[in-house]
Amino acid sequence: MNILHTYFDNKLVEAGFPSELTIESSLSYSQGDGVAFYGRLYSEDWINLYQHIYPEQTEKAYRRFAFIAEYIGANEYFNVLDITRNHFGYRYSHFNTMSLDACLAEEAFCFQDIRNKDKAIFREIWDNFIVDLSEYIKDTSTMLERLGYHLLEEEPLHKGWQA
């Protein structure tokens, strides 16, 4: 991992993503340049991301989502989210080359042993999270691209220093 990718990895962790996602970047001012990242997200990652996506939520909302995430992680078949390379990603690396592979709650989760009145609430919370996480992934990629270009454009610390 080069220095720039280490920097991107640290920024991803600051944004709530797990460390060691696959990071691909091309920052040469050409079409399709940018930063993309791929990998698996597990229930503990979802909880962390939820807190980053919704920083103004109440502690009760965080606990409710943590329950949903832990329940899905332990009891449901579709218990991993994947950020994958889409059909644009085989040539480019930018925000639009990533897809979040996730199912909506109605399609994927039974929520057995959960009261019926809570199932609808849980499904709505999950579905909203998936939509917002997809946007958050793209926003984070765009932020990494901007930071990457900014770092590459900065003057060296020492006049005689060469990259």
Image (tube, grey):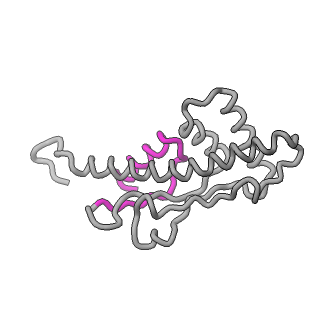
- The image quarter containing residue 124 is top right
Residue 104 on image: x %, y %: 70, 56
Q: State which quarter of the image contains the N terminus.
A: bottom left
The residue that appears at 42% across and 61% down in the rendered structure is: 24
The residue that appears at 70% across and 32% down in the rendered structure is: 63
In the displayed image of the protein, which residue is found farthest to the left? 160
Indicate whether residue 17 is drawn in magenta: yes
The residue that appears at 35% across and 66% down in the rendered structure is: 32
Residue 117 on image: x %, y %: 84, 40
Closer to us: 158 or 61 = 61
Segment tinted magenta in the rendering: 1-27
29 with respect to 102 (left or right): left
Q: Is residue 61 above or below residue 131?
A: above
Residue 126 on image: x %, y %: 69, 47
In the displayed image of the protein, which residue is found farthest to the top? 59
Closer to us: 24 or 160 = 24
Residue 59 on image: x %, y %: 65, 26
The residue that appears at 75% across and 43% down in the rendered structure is: 122
